[in-house]
Amino acid sequence: DVMDVTKLYMQTAATSSHPTTHKSTRMKSIAPGGSRFSPPHQVYLMFKSFILQFENNTDSVYVYDGDKETGEVLGVFYGGHPPPNEGIYSSSNSLLVIFKSDKNSSYTGFQASYHAVNCS
Protein backbone atom coordinates (compact mmCIF):
# COMPACT_ATOMS: atom_id res chain seq x y z
CA ASP A 1 0.00 0.00 0.00
CA VAL A 2 1.18 3.53 -0.71
CA MET A 3 0.56 6.41 1.64
CA ASP A 4 1.03 9.47 -0.56
CA VAL A 5 0.60 12.36 1.80
CA THR A 6 2.36 14.73 -0.59
CA LYS A 7 -0.53 14.49 -3.05
CA LEU A 8 -3.47 13.54 -0.85
CA TYR A 9 -3.05 15.78 2.16
CA MET A 10 -0.20 18.22 1.80
CA GLN A 11 -0.03 19.53 -1.74
CA THR A 12 -2.14 22.02 -3.59
CA ALA A 13 -1.99 22.49 -7.33
CA ALA A 14 -1.32 26.21 -7.02
CA THR A 15 1.54 26.12 -4.54
CA SER A 16 2.98 22.57 -4.75
CA SER A 17 3.07 22.51 -0.97
CA HIS A 18 0.84 21.54 1.91
CA PRO A 19 -1.68 24.17 2.97
CA THR A 20 -0.85 26.18 6.07
CA THR A 21 -4.33 25.45 7.42
CA HIS A 22 -3.57 21.73 7.65
CA LYS A 23 -3.27 20.70 11.29
CA SER A 24 -3.02 16.92 11.51
CA THR A 25 -3.55 13.74 9.57
CA ARG A 26 -3.83 10.26 11.03
CA MET A 27 -2.90 7.23 8.99
CA LYS A 28 -3.13 3.75 10.37
CA SER A 29 -1.73 0.64 8.73
CA ILE A 30 -2.90 -2.71 9.96
CA ALA A 31 -1.19 -5.66 8.33
CA PRO A 32 -2.92 -9.02 8.28
CA GLY A 33 -1.58 -11.54 10.74
CA GLY A 34 -1.86 -13.10 14.11
CA SER A 35 -4.33 -15.78 13.06
CA ARG A 36 -3.62 -19.50 13.24
CA PHE A 37 -3.63 -19.61 9.43
CA SER A 38 -1.00 -16.98 8.78
CA PRO A 39 2.27 -16.00 10.41
CA PRO A 40 2.37 -12.82 12.48
CA HIS A 41 3.22 -9.71 10.51
CA GLN A 42 4.69 -6.33 11.20
CA VAL A 43 4.46 -3.08 9.27
CA TYR A 44 7.45 -1.71 7.34
CA LEU A 45 7.23 2.06 6.66
CA MET A 46 9.56 3.68 4.14
CA PHE A 47 9.66 7.41 3.35
CA LYS A 48 10.28 8.07 -0.35
CA SER A 49 10.55 11.84 0.00
CA PHE A 50 10.54 14.12 3.02
CA ILE A 51 10.63 17.93 2.82
CA LEU A 52 9.33 19.74 5.91
CA GLN A 53 10.42 22.80 7.90
CA PHE A 54 13.94 22.47 9.28
CA GLU A 55 13.14 23.58 12.84
CA ASN A 56 11.74 21.30 15.56
CA ASN A 57 8.22 22.00 16.90
CA THR A 58 7.00 23.14 13.48
CA ASP A 59 5.65 20.65 10.93
CA SER A 60 6.40 17.15 12.22
CA VAL A 61 5.58 13.51 11.53
CA TYR A 62 5.00 11.27 14.56
CA VAL A 63 5.29 7.49 14.15
CA TYR A 64 3.84 5.25 16.89
CA ASP A 65 4.19 1.51 17.37
CA GLY A 66 0.64 0.16 17.43
CA ASP A 67 -2.58 1.95 16.56
CA LYS A 68 -2.75 4.52 19.38
CA GLU A 69 -0.77 7.57 20.46
CA THR A 70 -0.12 5.80 23.76
CA GLY A 71 2.10 3.31 21.90
CA GLU A 72 5.88 3.58 21.84
CA VAL A 73 7.09 6.57 19.83
CA LEU A 74 9.23 5.16 17.02
CA GLY A 75 10.20 8.62 15.84
CA VAL A 76 9.38 12.29 15.57
CA PHE A 77 10.62 13.65 12.26
CA TYR A 78 10.92 17.14 10.75
CA GLY A 79 13.16 18.80 8.16
CA GLY A 80 16.21 18.93 10.45
CA HIS A 81 15.64 15.35 11.67
CA PRO A 82 14.36 13.27 8.73
CA PRO A 83 13.28 9.63 9.03
CA PRO A 84 15.95 6.94 8.65
CA ASN A 85 16.80 5.81 5.11
CA GLU A 86 16.42 2.16 6.13
CA GLY A 87 12.77 2.66 7.08
CA ILE A 88 10.84 1.88 10.26
CA TYR A 89 9.42 -1.45 11.49
CA SER A 90 6.55 -1.87 13.93
CA SER A 91 6.74 -4.58 16.57
CA SER A 92 3.24 -5.83 15.69
CA ASN A 93 0.75 -5.62 12.85
CA SER A 94 -0.14 -1.94 13.29
CA LEU A 95 1.53 1.45 13.00
CA LEU A 96 0.14 4.96 13.49
CA VAL A 97 1.49 7.95 11.54
CA ILE A 98 0.39 11.46 12.47
CA PHE A 99 1.34 14.66 10.65
CA LYS A 100 1.03 17.87 12.66
CA SER A 101 1.50 21.35 11.23
CA ASP A 102 2.12 24.63 13.02
CA LYS A 103 0.09 26.26 10.22
CA ASN A 104 2.75 28.95 9.63
CA SER A 105 4.70 27.81 6.56
CA SER A 106 4.16 25.22 3.88
CA TYR A 107 6.67 22.87 2.31
CA THR A 108 6.42 20.08 -0.24
CA GLY A 109 5.61 17.45 2.39
CA PHE A 110 6.38 13.76 2.30
CA GLN A 111 5.55 10.54 0.54
CA ALA A 112 5.72 7.15 2.22
CA SER A 113 4.80 3.55 1.53
CA TYR A 114 4.09 0.69 3.90
CA HIS A 115 4.02 -3.07 3.56
CA ALA A 116 3.17 -6.09 5.67
CA VAL A 117 6.25 -8.23 6.32
CA ASN A 118 6.62 -11.55 8.13
CA CYS A 119 8.02 -11.30 11.65
CA SER A 120 11.35 -13.07 11.84
Image (tube, rainbow, N blue to C red):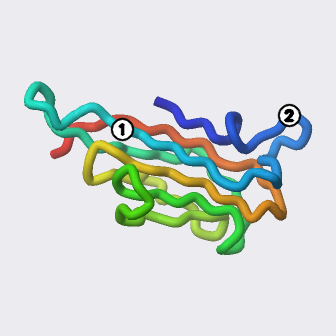
Residue shown at the point (70%, 35%) measured from the top left: 7
User: Residue placed farthest to the top in the image?
Assistant: 37
Tell me which amino acid carries mark 1: Ile
Q: Position of residue 25 (x, y in %)?
A: 61, 48
Residue 110: horizontal and vertical position, in percent?
Answer: 64, 47
Task: Name the residue type under label 2.
Answer: Ala
> What distance separates the C-alpha of mark 2 from that of mark 1?
31 Å
Of the two numbered discs 2 and 1 on the same chain, state the one appearing first in sequence. 2
Q: Secondary structure at mark 1?
A: strand
Residue 28 placement (x, y as % from top left): 45, 43
Crowding near pointer 1: few (<14 within 10 Å), some, many (20+)? some
Q: Residue at x 44, y 60 (%)?
A: 69
Quarter location, residue 42: top left
In the displayed structure image, the side of residue 65 where residue 53 appears, left or right: right
Q: Count neighbours of disc 2 (C-alpha within 10 A) and say few if under 14, some if 14 to 19, many if 20 or more.
A: few
Q: Secondary structure at mark 2?
A: loop
The residue lying at 63 percent from left, 62 percent from top is 60
Decide which of 65, 67 is in the foreground and name it.
67
Q: Nearer the viewer, mark 2 or mark 1?
A: 1
Looking at the rendered structure, which numbered label has been put on residue 30? 1
The residue that disc 2 covers is 13
Residue most toward the right? Answer: 14
